[in-house]
């Protein structure tokens, strides 16, 4: 392990805390802990790489954790994991930016065989747990959980990319006006320029330019709008939801970026002209949030199948670890709905160079992009 930010260190902390307590409490739809509802952890598996898989065998009835890496095996007392978790939480809270742990703490963590800050990026799951659910008496083997830490910046639920941008054709645009709007910049405290999405959008509107939503970027390899294809599996009206939401936020007609407020705004506009707007738009965005957690992205064709079968583990700002069980999907979706917001990422190349006016085949275009973050109240 080298350096990492608070959220990344939070994944290691979470593993240490679970092994120290050998159980994990289940959260309800509001994100609160049920003091009587917990999952007993019998085994934790972490795939650091395709070749390096670590198994931690534990039980609520023992005071030791047995660690296996291939043919290697060792045993450490539970107290070791408890001490490491407590110490690490303090160092994470005191850390700034990207930082390294203290040398002594790093050495002690290495004794637990944790060597990589992040699990293999090809896997949506950060850990696999074998759990005993005391409520049903059922043991489930190797169910996948992703870890979301709130100790640092709020983690993302839906990551932006070049293919998630909404493309608009501009009517009433001229070459000179395009040049003027593309020269609108703002500067941070260090004097570095950045593209002000809000200012450019409002400049379009104030100059009488009409924006017509025409879709998403074409994927070079597939030659189709991959994001639209993925959204249509969930609900063909979802593009209208995001179009209305982004326009509402940037025109400042929608008073907030949190998903419940945005959904209420979209329901009032009702772009799809459905008969029960509040029920329909809330249902479709919950489906999108859940699918995003389960593996949906804007740039990869999705077949509707989940890449996870357990849920996600939340590391709260105070270090509390709670599980959101995907099998209890209604409460899980409600939590995602209540604790997410629409955010605007940087306007660089990896995010599609959005908010830059351009000409293609003699027509003027403009792109908006977004991401969705957790925002626990």
Image (cartoon, grey):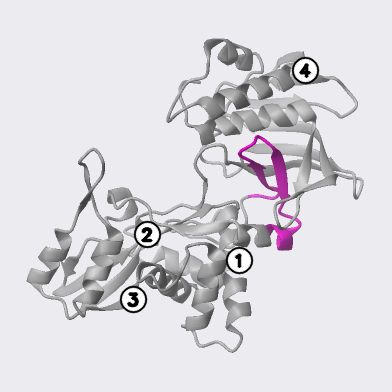
Image mark for residue 213: 3
Q: Is disc 1 placed on a helix, strand or loop?
A: helix
Q: Is residue 153 visible?
A: yes
Using the image, tell me which numbered label, if any, was put on residue 286.
1
Q: Earlier in the sequence, mark 4 or mark 3?
A: 4
Which residue matches tag 4? 79
Q: CA distance from mark 4 to mark 2?
A: 47 Å
| Residue lying at the far left of the rendered structure | 176
Residue 345 lies left or right of residue 77; in this view the side is: left
SS of the residue under disc 4: helix
Tell me whether the residue at label 3 lies in contact with that at label 1, contact meaning CB atoms closer than 8 angstroms.
Answer: no
Question: Image quarter for residue 368?
Answer: bottom left
In the rendered image, which quarter is residue 17 located in?
top right
Residue 237, position as x, y percentages in the image: 50, 77
What is the total number of numbered labels drawn onto the structure image? Answer: 4
Q: Secondary structure at mark 3?
A: strand
Q: Is residue 271 left or right of residue 213?
A: right
Of mark 2 and mark 1, the one earlier in the sequence is 2
Q: Is residue 138 shown in magenta?
A: no
Residue 332 place in picture, x, y as percent? 69, 57
Asked if disc 4 and disc 3 are in contact, CB closer than 8 Å, the reply is: no
Q: CA distance from mark 3 to mark 2?
A: 15 Å
For label 2, the residue is 163
Dot in front, 4 or 2: 4
Q: Which residues are magenta?
A: 308-332
**Mark 2 secondary-structure assignment:** helix
Residue at mark 4 to residue at mark 3: CA–CA distance: 58 Å
């Amino acid at each position: 392990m080298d350096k990492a930010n608070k959220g990344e260190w939070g994944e290691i902390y979470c593993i240490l805390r679970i092994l120290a307590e050998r159980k994990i409490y289940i959260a309800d739809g509001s994100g609160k802990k049920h003091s009587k509802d917990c999952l007993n952890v019998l085994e934790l598996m972490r795939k650091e790489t395709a070749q390096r898989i670590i198994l931690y065998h534990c039980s609520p009835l023992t005071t030791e954790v047995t660690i296996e890496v291939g043919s290697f095996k060792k045993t450490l007392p539970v107290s070791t994991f408890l001490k490491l978790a407590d110490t690490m939480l303090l160092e994470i809270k005191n850390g700034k930016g990207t930082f390294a742990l203290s040398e002594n703490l790093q050495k002690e963590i290495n004794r637990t065989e944790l060597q990589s800050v992040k699990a293999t990026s090809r896997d949506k799951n950060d850990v696999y747990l074998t759990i005993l659910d005391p409520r049903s008496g059922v043991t489930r083997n190797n169910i996948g959980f992703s870890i979301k830490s709130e100790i640092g910046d709020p983690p993302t639920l839906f990551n932006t990319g070049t293919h998630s941008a909404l493309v608009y054709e501009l009517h009433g645009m001229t070459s000179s006006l395009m040049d003027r709007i593309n020269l609108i910049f703002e500067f941070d405290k260090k004097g570095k320029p950045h593209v002000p999405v809000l200012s450019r959008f409002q400049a379009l509107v104030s100059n009488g330019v009409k924006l017509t939503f025409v879709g998403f970027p074409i994927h070079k390899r597939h030659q189709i709008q991959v994001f639209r294809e993925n959204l249509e599996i969930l609900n063909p009206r979802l593009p209208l939801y995001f179009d209305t939401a982004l326009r509402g936020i940037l025109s400042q007609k929608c008073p907030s970026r949190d998903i419940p407020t945005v959904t209420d705004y979209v329901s009032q506009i009702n772009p799809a002209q459905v008969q029960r707007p509040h029920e329909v738009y809330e249902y479709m965005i919950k489906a999108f949030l859940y699918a995003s957690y389960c593996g949906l992205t804007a740039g990869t064709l999705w077949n509707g199948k989940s890449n996870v079968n357990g849920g996600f583990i939340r590391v709260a700002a105070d270090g509390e670890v709670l599980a959101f069980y995907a099998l209890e999907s209604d409460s899980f979706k409600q939590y995602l709905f209540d604790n997410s917001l629409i955010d605007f990422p940087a306007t660089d190349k990896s995010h599609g160079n959005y908010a830059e006016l351009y000409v293609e085949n003699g027509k003027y275009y403009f792109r908006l992009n977004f991401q969705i973050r957790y925002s626990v109240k």
